[in-house]
Image: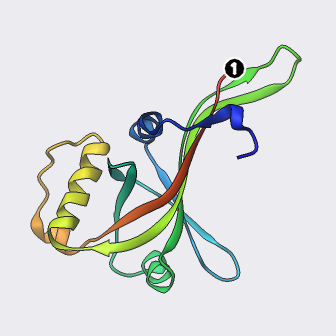
Amino acid sequence: MRRTDREVTDFSEILDILRRADTIRLALHDEPYPYVVPLSFGFEASDGKIALYFHGAKEGLKHELIARNPYVCAEADIFHRYADLPNGEVTTEYESVIGFGRCERVTGEEAAKGADLLCTHCGHDGYVYDSAALEATAVYRVTLERFSGKRRRV
């Protein structure tokens, strides 16, 4: 990271940013351009590792690209405000997390856990969904192999 003065290295602070972020952007390999899609998500962390969960259709471009190449980049950010600096310039106050990992479709209990984590993160803890809806949905897990956080405060 070029601006180490803005780097967030504390694991609990990185998790806090993820807790407060409402969307991840998932970058997938496509040709000739990358494909980026915004997603609602849930996550869990243990032993210094982070797993992100999201859902989607069982078919379509996102599904095809993940099947073709499971290595992805995920980004979450929180915009706070535009801020005036004493020198007359304007900057942005923000917090973000970016990570790289492998995406895979999960099924059974792991899919149910992912759906529960997603619902909880989206403000619907304990939401009871129809099991047929879960069967009709693809749930994915991104296991982040490396990640970093960054923030800018004035």
Amino acid at dot 1:
Val
Q: Where is residue 108 in the image (x, y as percent from the top left)?
A: 16, 72
- Quadrant containing the C terminus is top right
Mark 1 crowdedness (10 Å alpha carbons): few <14, some 14-19, many ≥20: few
Kindly indicate the quadrant of the structure image that contains residue 149: top right
Residue found 15% across the figure and 48% down from its top: 127
Which residue is at a point 89% across and 17% down the rendered structure image? 87
Residue 152 lies in what quarter of the image? Answer: top right
Q: In this view, does 79 lie to the left or right of 109?
A: right
Instruction: Decide: is 63 above or below 37.
Output: below
Q: Residue furthest front?
A: 47
Which residue is situated farthest in the right direction here?
A: 87
Image location (x, y in percent) of residue 105: 32, 74
Q: How many marks?
A: 1
Classify residue 112 as left or right of residue 61.
Answer: left
Query: Is 51 left, or right, of 88 in this rendering?
Result: left
138 sits to left or right of 91: left
Q: Position of residue 8 (x, y in %)?
A: 57, 36
Q: In this view, does 44 lie above or below 132?
A: above
Q: What element carries label 1?
A: loop
Residue 90 pos. (x, y %) = 80, 26
The residue under the point 18% across, 62% down is 112
- Say above or below: 118 vs 28: above
* Image coloring type: rainbow
Residue at numbered disc 1: 154
